[in-house]
């Protein structure tokens, strides 16, 4: 396993005299009845990435399933109409959070729209926008200008294309330029997924991630990546560091999975089981 020793410098050793509060609190707003696995995968990834407290808010119909699959997490059910009581409860969660992830498996609907706008209005910590929250953004991308915090978006080429009105093939022809221009225009970090993932900063710099393989082109891997980013941000890494290191770690878990089980059988469940081996190797190289 080839570890980029320069890149992992942002990965801090854990002080022996520490407690869960030292490792951040990530709020994950994810999942729906038909895509509860997104919340589970993101939550498991966040927990395995060293978060102090993983807080998952999800539609009430999937509360029992998600809480049983991620027993380490604090779980909060929300109603479909995002009621006044929900708003009060979520605002308290937002105030406690050190990072927020929204979008994985939520569906493109009014529920997602309302919560995304609520997060943009109230979040003062790094906000990771993925999946269906990105699809909601395509309806009015100008709402990014309402942000009060650092933002990381994690689109695949199709989602990136919808954000700027181009096809996925057009995006892939100019990946670096697309990511950097979008980041500069909106003052955010863009992680454009795909072969050789591009991570760009609001200041025009970009980085290419070289870990990962075609076996990772399957449902749920993006949810896993976002969960890792949320953990890293909550633990105090900058948004750019978090995105870069998460892409590297995520890709390594995919490479290890392909090596042990084949590219054909690579999937998020197996990658999550191998994630601790990746972190063990990183810890050895610190």
Image (cartoon, rainbow, N blue to C red):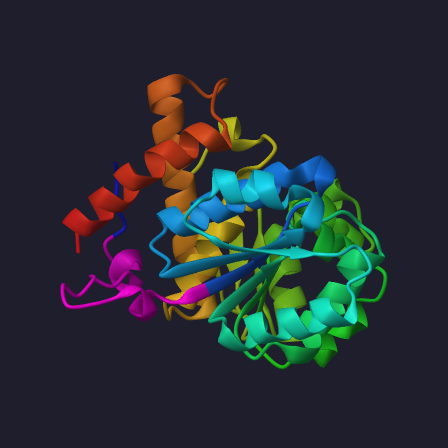
In magenta segment, residue 22: yes
**Of 227 and 75, the residue lying toward us:** 75
Q: Quadrant of the N terminus?
A: top left
Q: Is residue 150 visible?
A: no
| Residue 164 part of the magenta segment | no
In the rendered image, residue 68, in percent from the top left (x then y), is placed at 50, 39
Q: Is residue 110 visible?
A: yes
Residue 101, compared with residue 4, is above or below; it is below
- The quarter in which the C terminus is drawn is bottom left
Name the residue at 49% across, 38% down.
69
Residue 191 in which image quadrant:
bottom right
Q: At which x and y percent is residue 122?
A: 65, 79
Q: Position of residue 98 (x, y in %)?
A: 46, 71
Q: Across the whole image, how many numbered discs are drawn on residues?
A: 0
- Front-most of residues 105 and 156: 105
Task: Residue at 58%, 75% (x, y): give it.
Answer: 92
- Residue 252 vs residue 152: left or right? left
Q: Is residue 10 left or right of residue 245?
A: left
Q: Residue 277 occupies which quadrant of the picture?
A: top left
Give the image quarter of residue 110: bottom right
The foreground one among 62 and 259 is 62
> Residue 275: x percent and y percent?
35, 39
User: Position of 57 compared to 255: left or right?
Assistant: right
| Residues in magenta, as a range | 5-25
- Residue at point 36% right, 47% down? 48
205 left or right, relative to 144? left
- Look at the picture and state if 91 lies above or below 176: below
Out of 140 and 32, give the one closest to the viewer: 32
Residue placed at 31% from the left, 58% from the top?
A: 7
- Seen in the picture, residue 120 relative to 81 is either above or below; the reply is below
């Amino acid at each position: 396993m080839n570890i980029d020793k320069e890149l992992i410098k942002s990965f801090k050793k854990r002080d022996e005299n520490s407690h869960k509060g030292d490792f951040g609190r990530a709020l994950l707003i994810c999942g729906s009845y038909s895509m509860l696995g997104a919340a589970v995968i993101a939550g498991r990834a966040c927990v395995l990435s060293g978060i102090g407290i993983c807080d998952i808010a999800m539609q009430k119909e999937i509360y029992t399933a998600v809480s049983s699959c991620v027993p380490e997490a604090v779980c909060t059910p929300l109603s479909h109409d995002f009621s006044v009581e929900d708003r009060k409860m979520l605002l308290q969660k937002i105030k406690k959070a050190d990072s927020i992830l929204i979008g994985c498996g939520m569906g493109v609907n009014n529920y997602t729209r309302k919560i995304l706008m609520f997060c943009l209005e109230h979040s003062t910590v790094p906000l990771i926008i993925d999946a269906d929250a990105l699809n909601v953004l395509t309806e009015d991308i100008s709402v990014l200008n309402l942000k009060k915090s650092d933002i990381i978006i994690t689109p695949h080429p199709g989602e990136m294309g919808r954000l700027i009105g181009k096809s996925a093939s057009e995006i892939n022809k100019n990946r670096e330029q697309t990511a950097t221009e979008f980041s500069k225009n909106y003052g955010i970090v863009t992680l454009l997924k795909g072969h050789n993932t591009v991570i760009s900063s609001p200041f025009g710099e970009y980085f290419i991630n070289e870990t990962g393989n075609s076996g990772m082109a399957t449902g749920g891997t993006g949810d896993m990546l976002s969960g890792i980013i949320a953990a890293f941000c909550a633990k105090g890494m900058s948004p750019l560091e978090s995105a870069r290191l998460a892409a590297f770690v995520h890709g390594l878990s995919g490479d290890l999975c392909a090596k042990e089980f084949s590219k054909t059988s690579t999937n998020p469940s197996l990658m999550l089981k191998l994630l601790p081996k990746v972190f063990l190797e990183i810890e050895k190289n610190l």
